[in-house]
Amino acid sequence: MASAATGFDGDQWIDPHMATKRDYYELLGIQRNATDDEIKKAYRKLAMKYHPDRNAGNAEAAEMFKEVSEAYEVLSDSGKRQRYDQYGHEGVKSAFGPGGFDFGRDFSHSADFQDIFSSLFGGGGGGIFGEMFGGGQRRRSRDGSQRGADLRFDLEIDLEEAIFGVERNIDLPVTEACGDCAGSGAAKGSSRETCRQCGGQGSIISGGGFIQFQQTCPVCRGEGTIIRTPCKKCGGAGRVKVRRNLALRIPPGVETGSRLRVSGKGEGGLRGGPAGDLYVILHVREHSIFERQGADLACSIPVPPDIAALGGDIAVPTPDGIATLKLPHGTPNGKVFRLRGKGMPSLNGSGAGDLHVRIAIEVPTRLSSSQKRLLQSFSESCDAGNYPDAAQMQKRAEAFMARRDVLRAHR
Ligand SMILES: [Zn+2]
Ligand SMILES: [Zn+2]
């Protein structure tokens, strides 16, 4: 039930996508020049090892299964593999959305996956991937339990929160295992009974002679069991809709596309099956001062022309507080200074990027008459030596006009 959370819910991982993503070849334990066959073989072995059906309730195995599946998805596709070889994870990022692997995507259409899984587990691959990635049909395990789907939650944060980290409470609608019947769907004191129609198989064979076909049992709808007395609270569904309030800890240094995994906080499992995981995808809003450039931050600081000409101190806001930047005399407009270590903190807690400070000379406005007189007399004191760029432009303009005169004269 939605309860005000104290502390943090579930185990929380930060997956700063590209930064800690493991190399696909390393994941599959193969050489970079592995043949398609070797890739397939390696994946087959690992998929068997980590498959959720063999590792019920083991979150680590589930994660490994996803990771090796993702690696296989990329390396088994020559185009994606080429992009991956050339650009690393960045090169195939788009294929998985900004946050890395797109677990909302259904792989079951992939002929190769179908092939591997039907040969491995004797059934269509769709169920497995449907379950792993939150769509499509579900695969039941032998005891009828079913893992809940993984959920995705998109969370917008501002840059301050990305820089300093924040604790955020999110409120999300989720279905969880019904507390009254522990997810069985059967009323208290009763239990699910084996379906008599199919004898618990979930499917029936019909037809006769040479033509036989298997179909989902219409009585239990493939479940293998039926409920005589449905649970009052969930009406037999085994799950109830709730709004869940979760405390999330967002560490300093995250960026758009970073994802937090909160284990066991996805959709509730059915009939004792484990809950899915919740993935929180972060989106960092644009900021009024800073623009993010990877680990670095950039900002543009308006500077009066007299300070730029004479040199002087300017104040620059940084994540570490106000820094003083000493401008040398004759600082041109657009010049960029780099303040080391004043950018984004790194996610692993060591060091930070830089802050790039761009000088934007601001022309003074609303001049008083005495200011106008001062500028006037300053202006009169100037010569070409004070404005070398203007002097050079004047020379070029004169040369252009001379050429123009010559060419026009011969027309
Ligand atoms: Zn119930
Ligand atoms: Zn049945």
Image (cartoon, rainbow, N blue to C red):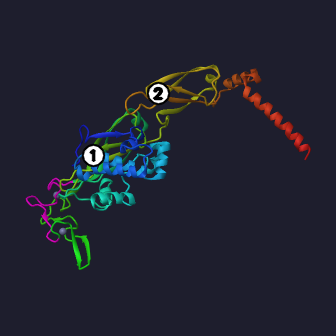
Say left or right for 226 vs 309.
left
Q: CA distance from mark 2 to mark 1?
A: 39 Å
Q: Are marks 2 and 1 in contact (CB under 8 Å)?
A: no
Q: Amino acid at mark 1?
A: Ala
| Element type at mark 2 | loop
Q: Look at the image and say whether residue 392 sits in the magenta stretch.
A: no
Q: Is residue 315 above or below residue 54?
A: above
Relative to the observer, which residue lies in front, 243 or 133?
133
Residue named by callout 1: 61
Q: Position of residue 349 (x, y in %)?
A: 37, 30
Q: Amino acid at mark 2?
A: Lys
Q: Residue at x 44, y 29 (%)?
A: 352
Q: Residue at x 36, y 43 (%)?
A: 29
Residue named by callout 2: 342
- Decide whether the magenta segment is chiefly helix, strand or loop: loop
Residue 374 visible to the viewer: yes
Residue 263 visible to the viewer: no
Say left or right for 159 vs 175.
right
Q: Quadrant of ligand 1?
A: bottom left
Residue 340 tag number: none
| Residue occupying the far right of the picture | 410
Binning the other alpha carbons within 10 Å of mark 1 as few (below 14), some (14 to 19) or many (20 upward) gives some
- Of badges 2 and 1, the one in the foreground is 1
Q: Is residue 178 above or below residue 358?
A: below
Relative to the observer, which residue lies in front, 133 or 375?
133
Q: Position of residue 130 (x, y in %)?
A: 32, 57
Range of the magenta residues? 177-197
